[in-house]
Image (tube, rainbow, N blue to C red):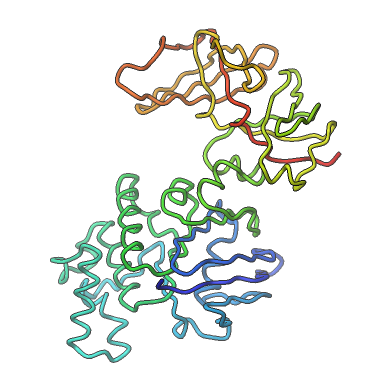
Amino acid sequence: MKGSEVRIEGIDKHFGDFHALKNVGVDIQKGEFFSLLGPSGCGKTTLLRIIAGFETPSAGIVYVDGRNILPLPPNRRQVNTIFQNYALFPHLTVFENVAFALRLKKYGKQEINSKVEEYLNLTKLTGQEYKKPAQLSGGQKQRVAIARALVNEPDVLLLDEPLSALDAKLRQHMLIELDMIHDKIGITFIYVTHDQQEALSVSDHIAVMNEGRIVQVGNPTEIYESPADIFVANFIGEANLFNGTVTAVEGEMVWVAVEPLGILKVTMEPGDLEGTRDFKPGRRVSITVRPEKINISLEKPADLPADAFNFFPCAVDEVIYNGFQSKFFVTIPDFARFTLKVFKQHMSYYSTGSEINWKDKAWIWWKADDAYLVEVHDA
């Protein structure tokens, strides 16, 4: 496996009175595609700049393959950075931009030509060698930045929101290419983004950050399906959130009273059964259900076990057609202050079942397994 293992321990960073990073620690495995995900101002770029050597932490250590790299200047760390604004030299050609670092290191002409050709080919820039950055598209500029960073053959590649300047379709295309490049060269990627879909699409593991802290680390499935708290549940994708009181616990099943909605059935995670959370009757909890986990129909479903599903009549307040899916915004009688989101995937040209329209009366239901107890509040 190529690349390096990165260990971040107890990193704090103050900018005057502002506490940008608060005791941040995480392990990044050799050769993985690791994302730092969070809203603007959460500290993810500051953490990346500390790894690169452009910022000095107020406390903590950064290890690469077990070696503390904080005493090293940026040019002596086997780490390269791709910036949001590309940072290309406008007066140099594509070839000269990619070759720049190799010439600084006094590589021979033949070796420079060979390496530049290799990485231009990897990034699909063959034929663009003699163009200046101003003659390139946004996607091509991004490829030049990637080739220039990779030609040094770093152990760790840091990517600071590298696709944010591109339009939506090109961004998705470049994300796929970036993932393919990672698969080919196999070094460690640390990718900063505020875009949840980007992180979920390409990452081996994700660290979700908020207000200078890492609030959850996991693979994309864990982050999406088992959010650590309300912030993660709301930040990653979309979620319906209920607050209620535990009324009973039996085996893996928890019954939660949500006023005035009624009783919701929720299945606990295996870790919860081992005592990692306290779900005693009387405790206040928060529950999340993803919109795509909820079914909707004009007819009440039959032959579904009542002890494993939650059923409610509803009124359709809004319908939004998005091509591949429809989004329904519904309210439940006596719970009208709360709007639920329901997403229905279109599996074929002719949508299955009767068409559901604005102001229709309908039924919604979801499995207890698809609801998640996301937070336990103080008694």
Q: Residue 184 location, x and y as percent? A: 31, 65
Residue at 48% in and 26% down? 343
Q: On screen, 171 above or below 261?
A: below
Residue at 49% in and 74% down? 52
Which of the 4 image quadrants contains residue 104?
Answer: bottom left
Specify whether 376 is left or right of 15. right
Q: On screen, 115 above or below 87?
A: below
Q: Residue 186 location, x and y as percent? A: 37, 67
- Most extreme residue toward the front is 251
Specify whether 65 is left or right of 338. left
Residue at 41% in and 26% down? 345
Which of the 4 image quadrants contains residue 68?
Answer: bottom right
Q: Residue 333 location, x and y as percent? A: 66, 11
Which of the 4 image quadrants contains residue 98?
Answer: bottom left
Q: Residue 57 location, x and y as percent? A: 63, 74
Residue at 64% in and 66% down? 25
Specify whether 378 is left or right of 96. right
- Most extreme residue toward the left is 127
Specify whether 319 is left or right of 331. left
